[in-house]
Amino acid sequence: MADAQVTYDDVVAARETLAGVALRTPLLHSHALSDGLGGPVHLKCENLQRSGSFKVRGAYVRIAGLNAEERGRGVVAASAGNHAQGVALSSGLVGIKSTVYMPEGAPLPKVAAARSYGADVIFAGDTVDIALARAREHAEQTGAVFIHPFDHPDVIAGQGTIGLEILEQFPEVGTIVMSVGGGGLAAGVALAAKSLRPGVRIVGVQAERAAAYPASLAAGHPVMVRPASTMADGIAVGLPGELPFELIHYLVDSVVTVTESEISQALVLCLERAKQVVEPAGVAAVAAILAHPQVFEPPVVAVLSGGNIDPLLLSKVLRHGLAAAGRYLTLRVQLPDRPGALASLVTKLAELGANVLDIVHERLNMRVGEVEVQLQLETRGPVHSDEVLGSLRRDGYRLTIG
């Protein structure tokens, strides 16, 4: 890696640039994750960073390094949301104009935040990669400086300051795990951490539906994939960056993937046990610890990379996570169409300790003399859910799950 375009000294210089701008985010011990893994697990809370994610670190270092002529032309960026906010906030701090391209359907809170920081927001396509292409075109046509979300030395150096903080806050760390989209965060943290502690393990995590790095690492060069729809929109990047890929190829020990169900369960755990609001992309590291404990040698630090989540999405993801954990049941029950039938069912559920969250009574498309009741139930977990379903079936109820 003699020809690497970013070095450990760049990361140290980036921290000086970020003094007074980026927060030194807290490192919180997680009893729930530690108990499950059998060793200490700490959470690096970049969800509490300014603009709600780690992205402001790299964005500010890049923008602060522009000369007067470049600043006069303004900047343009593309992002699913967090980089957009980081660029918008950083541009405002420096006092220059910013334009950000975001995919159609980008979370509304991220759009609103970018605008509140002063950026002009333009929607383009349905993926980050399309938005990136449009932002590059904008730069060519207007002269604005393109601020790449991950494939630039300054951006990687800025993200790498997280690695410096982790080793200062928890010197005995054995494994650092974080989400991976384009790769800027993992590349920067790996460079910083392994420059100080060559033996520390670095693990990256991608959403299974948008995992370009496993195929790219196998091929030895960045490979384009078409990301499927995933709740982890912040890491749904189809093509790894050239520079991050080089660093990750040499410095990251492994890259694992997590499912939508595993992401949602991790989000529930962070909210319930760590009292941290984290977006799906930001909680991928925790999801990996829960899903692949054998990969992680404690002590472990998991980076919560962002907390910018739409409240409506949060409610859906929580419901999804509770269902995946066996604490939320949706079922349909056929009942005789006579007085007291529904009351008897509800009474039975109360006796079983299941909490009825919602009921829909359906007569259409049913046989004469029957009704269908759609129920949403809260239970205490998988064992309790099985007990509820088993008892209902033994009592003769005809039911369908889901």
Image (cartoon, rainbow, N blue to C red):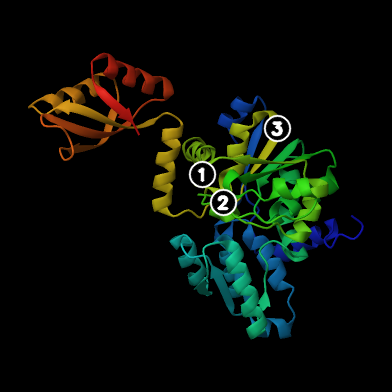
Residue 132 location (% of width, % of height): 62, 68
Disc 3 designates what residue? 295
Residue 220 location (% of width, % of height): 80, 50
On screen, residue 223 above or below 260: below
Q: Quadrant of the N terminus?
A: bottom right
**How far apart are the two marked residues, 2 and 3, measured between alpha carbons?**
24 Å
Disc 1 designates what residue? 276
For marks 2 and 3 on the same chain, the one whose residue lies earlier in the sequence: 2
Residue at figure coordinates x 61%, y 63% from the top left: 129
At label 2, the amino acid type is Asn
* 242 with respect to 292 (left or right): right
On screen, residue 203 above or below 147: above
Q: Is residue 90 visible?
A: no
At label 3, the amino acid type is Val
Do the numbered discs 2 and 1 sit on residues whose CB atoms are within 8 Å? yes
**How far apart are the two marked residues, 2 and 1, measured between alpha carbons?**
8 Å
Q: Secondary structure at mark 1?
A: loop
Residue 314 location (% of width, % of height): 43, 48
Disc 2 designates what residue? 47
Q: Nearer the viewer, residue 121 or 112?
A: 121
Q: Quadrant of residue 369?
A: top left
For marks 1 and 3 on the same chain, the one whose residue lies earlier in the sequence: 1
Q: Nearer the viewer, residue 22 or 374?
A: 374
* 345 with respect to 150 (left or right): left
Q: Secondary structure at mark 2?
A: helix
Q: Quadrant of the C terminus?
A: top left
- Mark nearer the viewer, 1 or 3: 3
* 181 with respect to 231 (left or right): right
